Structure formats: structure tokens, C-alpha cells
Image: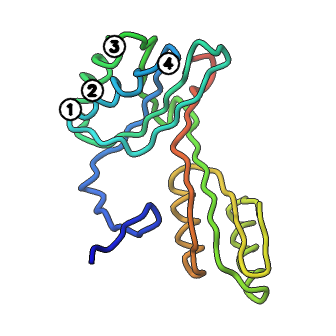
Amino acid sequence: MKSIITTDTPVDIPAKAQGPTHTLSILVNNEPGVLMRICQVFSRRGFNIDSLVVSEGRNANFSRMTIGISGDPQGLDQIIKQVSKLIDVIHCFEHTSDDSVTKEMIMIKIQCSPAERSQALQITEHFTGKTVDLTPVSMIVMITGDTVKIDAAVVMFSQFEIIETVRTGKVVMARGEQAT
């Protein structure tokens, strides 16, 4: 019988196997097939998409894609150029922590008895989280922040039985007057 692996199955991936991470912001026409064409560029170049967030912009004709990728930094400039040449792509930029603000969100559902609840609430408060659901035997906590903060919160909540996690990809916005 095969074992089932879900998105909540812990998998240890050595950092060196993933390679350096990069965050790209891509403004595109809001048209069918755009995401597929962009993903093919990454696939052909051997980059893995670690996170992907797509949402309609202020103008419904455009969508913003924020893509977290890992792979050889030598090919990154070429990927940005190839993505920028695609039909329906307005622009593509790499953002660093120096020129942008990057955040993620996670919801963690833990099994937690009333006796354990105060400890879980202290952890939630420490990470500036919010309790979004509470039952006699479980609670759901929502935490926002950078990747390091989200990872640290998961480690701290691991002392409880984690029932489920749902995590967004990165969202990014350029600092100051620079366009995202």
C-alpha cells in the first residue's frame, strides 16, 4: 500500500538543495493562459516555483503575480528577460528585502485542550497572531510576517498536535515611489 503525502506532511529539504530564493513581481494583462506561459519559462530554465500569488489589480484589466522561486542565480536575469518578452506581460522585476516589503500569512489549526490553551495563546501573542477560531478541543491561529517569522511560529506550535496548516505565498510591494 502506498503512503499518502499531503501538503501537511513534514518533508525535510536541505537548504542547499533548494538554492537561493528570489521574489519576482510580474504585472500582466488579466487574460487566460498567461500563468501557464510564465510557468513554462521557469520550468525550461530549471527553476522551481516555491510560492505563487496571483490577484486582480486595482484595474480589473491587469493582474499582479508574485512568484517566489529557487534555483541558480546565474539564470535569473535571463528568466526575467524571457518573461518580460511574453505577450500579456507588462513588466517583471526582482525584489529584494532592501527595496521592498514581503509578507506571508499562515493559518495553523492545533489540537489544544482548555489546560493547554493559555500556552497556545502566549505563543500566538508572541508572534503578533490572532485567534480566528476556537472550539473546546482546537483553535485556529492566523499569523502574518516574513518567511523566518512564519517558520519560527510553526516550530513553536509543533509542541501541540498540528491538525492542519494553510500558508499563502509571498506578497511583495516596492518601497517608496518605485513601482511594484
Q: What element carries label 1?
A: loop
Specify the amino acid type for callout 2.
Answer: Val
Residue at horizontal 65 percent and vertical 51 percent from the top: 144
Question: Where does the image place residue 141, in percent across and percent down from the top left?
Answer: 70, 64
On the image, numbered disc 3 is attached to which residue?
Answer: 86
Check disc 3: other Cα within 10 Å, few if <14, some if 14-19, many if 20+: some
Residue at horizontal 27 percent and vertical 78 percent from the top: 1
Question: Where does the image place residue 156, in percent across and percent down from the top left?
Answer: 58, 73
Q: What element carries label 4?
A: strand
Q: Which of 101 and 172 is in front in this view?
A: 172
Q: Residue furthest front?
A: 1
Dot 1 or dot 4, earlier in sequence: 4
Q: Nearer the viewer, residue 106 or 134?
A: 134
User: On the rendered structure, is 89 left or right of 107?
Assistant: left
Specify the amino acid type for callout 3.
Answer: Leu
On the image, numbered disc 4 is attached to which residue?
Answer: 27
Q: Are marks 1 and 2 in contact (CB under 8 Å)?
A: yes
CA–CA distance in space, label 2 to label 3? 10 Å
CA–CA distance in space, label 1 to label 4? 21 Å
Q: Which residue lies furthest to the bottom in this view?
A: 115
User: On the rendered structure, is 137 left or right of 96?
Assistant: right
Residue at horizontal 64 percent and vertical 74 percent from the top: 110
On the image, numbered disc 1 is attached to which residue?
Answer: 45
Dot 4 or dot 2, earlier in sequence: 4
Q: Is mark 3 on a helix, strand or loop?
A: loop
Q: Nearer the viewer, residue 101 or 18?
A: 18
